[in-house]
């Protein structure tokens, strides 16, 4: 095959349509609105309007500032669950300490009884 034939095939391949027609979604110029900092910007996507909780203007990774975003009270729910778990752990530890103290008391009583019976013999 000659170099001319290879070049012609390359031209034919690259001059044809790259994407198939009729299978791709429609692309819109979209307005993105950040609910956290009320920033809006435009981009191209298949959705007409986008609302986001956090964007690059207010995200701690990009800004370097720590910002606590509480969506639907999740932080409060987490703190409540954490406090409940701590309380439960403390009560379990207290019950275990009471049980250990009772067991030590019983063992001490048995020890004294054993020493008293061995002294009588």
Image (cartoon, helix red, strand yellow):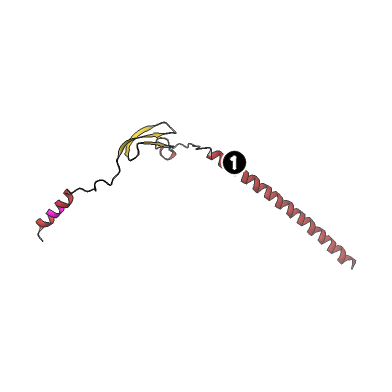
In the image, what residue occupies the spot 59% across and 44% down?
82
Q: Position of residue 85 (x, y in %)?
A: 62, 46
In the image, what residue occupies the spot 15% across and 51% down?
12
Q: Which residue is mark 1?
A: 80
Residue 32's quadrant in the figure? top left
The stretch drawn in magenta includes residue 8: yes
Q: Position of residue 66 (x, y in %)?
A: 47, 37
Q: Say whether residue 54 is left or right of residue 75.
A: left
Q: Which residues are magenta?
A: 7-11
- The crowding category of the residue bearing disc 1, from other C-alpha atoms within 10 Å (few below 14, some 14 to 19, many at least 20), is few
Residue 47's quadrant in the figure? top left
The stretch drawn in magenta includes residue 92: no
In which quadrant will I find the N terminus?
bottom left
In the image, what residue occupies the spot 56% across and 40% down?
77
In this view, the residue farthest toward the front is: 22
Disc 1 is placed on an element classified as helix
In which quadrant will I find the C terminus?
bottom right
- Image label count: 1
Task: Please tell me which residue lies in front, 99 or 9.
Answer: 9
In the image, what residue occupies the spot 70% across and 52% down?
96
Task: Please tell me which residue lies in front, 38 or 98.
Answer: 38
Q: Position of residue 88 (x, y in %)?
A: 65, 47
């Amino acid at each position: 095959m000659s170099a001319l034939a290879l070049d012609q095939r390359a031209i034919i391949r690259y001059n044809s349509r790259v994407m198939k027609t009729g299978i791709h979604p429609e692309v819109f110029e979209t307005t993105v609105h950040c609910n956290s900092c009320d920033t809006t910007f435009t981009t191209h996507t298949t959705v007409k309007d986008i609302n986001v909780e956090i964007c690059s203007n207010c995200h701690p990774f990009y800004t370097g500032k720590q910002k606590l975003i509480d969506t639907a009270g999740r932080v409060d729910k987490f703190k409540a669950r954490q406090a409940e778990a701590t309380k439960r752990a403390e009560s379990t530890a207290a019950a275990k300490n009471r049980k250990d103290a009772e067991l030590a008391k019983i063992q001490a009583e048995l020890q004294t009884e054993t020493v008293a019976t061995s002294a009588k013999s």
